[in-house]
Image (tube, rainbow, N blue to C red):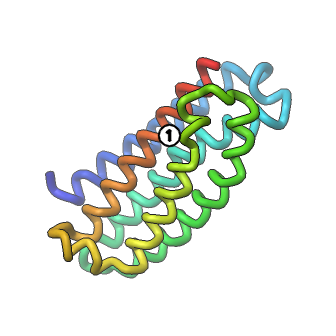
């Protein structure tokens, strides 16, 4: 698959999921937005789709011709994702200590750190035969998979 096609599909999918999540939250407003913990968890799911969507959009805008654009956006977005997801780890463990996502929520901040690392050191993936945006695409796929797990666990707890 062409890398620009991957990021176009990923961006559209993530922003589509953000819109769907708004609908879900709107239908559950009284239940989810009444206390701080569930409100922050609902916001965590929102951010889990929004941040990869923004990164995917930046990859399309910057592309391989202007790597500085996507690199800057990926570093800023991954720092935001790292900070936000790190704060949510304790909360997810308190709300659902036995959930699969809650037990493995450390993966999300670790993936965000890897995204930032490979955005700063964009030449490293070429050592293993990958282009920089291919490596980032693999990491974003992991983040989106985690976002789905977080949404599922939050909705079914």
Q: What is the x, y in percent for residue 102?
A: 61, 35
Residue at x 46% of width, y 53% of height: 52
Q: Quadrant of the C terminus?
A: top right
Q: What is the x, y in percent for residue 108?
A: 52, 50
Residues 40 and 14: in front is 40
Residue at x 63% of width, y 51% of height: 85
Residue at x 58% of width, y 66% of height: 79
Q: Which residue is mark 1?
A: 147
Q: What is the x, y in percent for residue 37?
A: 79, 35
Residues 50 and 145: in front is 145
Number of marks in the rendered image: 1
Q: What is the x, y in percent for residue 68?
A: 39, 81
Residues 95 and 51: in front is 95
Residue 90 lies in quadrant: top right
Q: Is residue 69 left or right of residue 24?
A: left
Residues 148 and 51: in front is 148
47 shown above or below 28:
below
Residue 70 lies in quadrant: bottom left
Residue at x 57% of width, y 43% of height: 105
Q: Is residue 81 left or right of residue 94?
A: left
Q: Secondary structure at mark 1?
A: helix
Query: Dot 1, how many residues are within 10 Å of its Cα: few (below 14), some (14-19), or many (20+)?
Result: many
The extreme right residue here reads 35
């Amino acid at each position: 698959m062409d890398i620009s096609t991957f990021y176009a599909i990923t961006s559209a999918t993530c922003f589509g999921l953000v819109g769907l999540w708004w609908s879900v939250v709107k239908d559950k407003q009284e239940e989810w937005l009444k206390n701080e913990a569930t409100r922050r968890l609902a916001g965590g799911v929102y951010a889990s789709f929004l941040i990869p969507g923004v990164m995917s959009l930046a990859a399309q805008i910057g592309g391989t011709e202007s790597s500085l654009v996507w690199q800057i956006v990926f570093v800023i977005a991954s720092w935001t994702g790292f900070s936000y997801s790190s704060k949510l780890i304790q909360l997810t463990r308190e709300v659902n200590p036995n959930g699969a996502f809650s037990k493995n929520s450390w993966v999300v901040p670790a993936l965000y750190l890897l995204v930032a690392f490979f955005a700063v050191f964009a030449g490293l993936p070429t050592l293993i035969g990958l282009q920089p945006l291919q490596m980032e695409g693999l990491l974003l796929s992991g983040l989106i998979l985690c976002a789905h797990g977080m949404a599922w666990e939050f909705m079914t707890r």
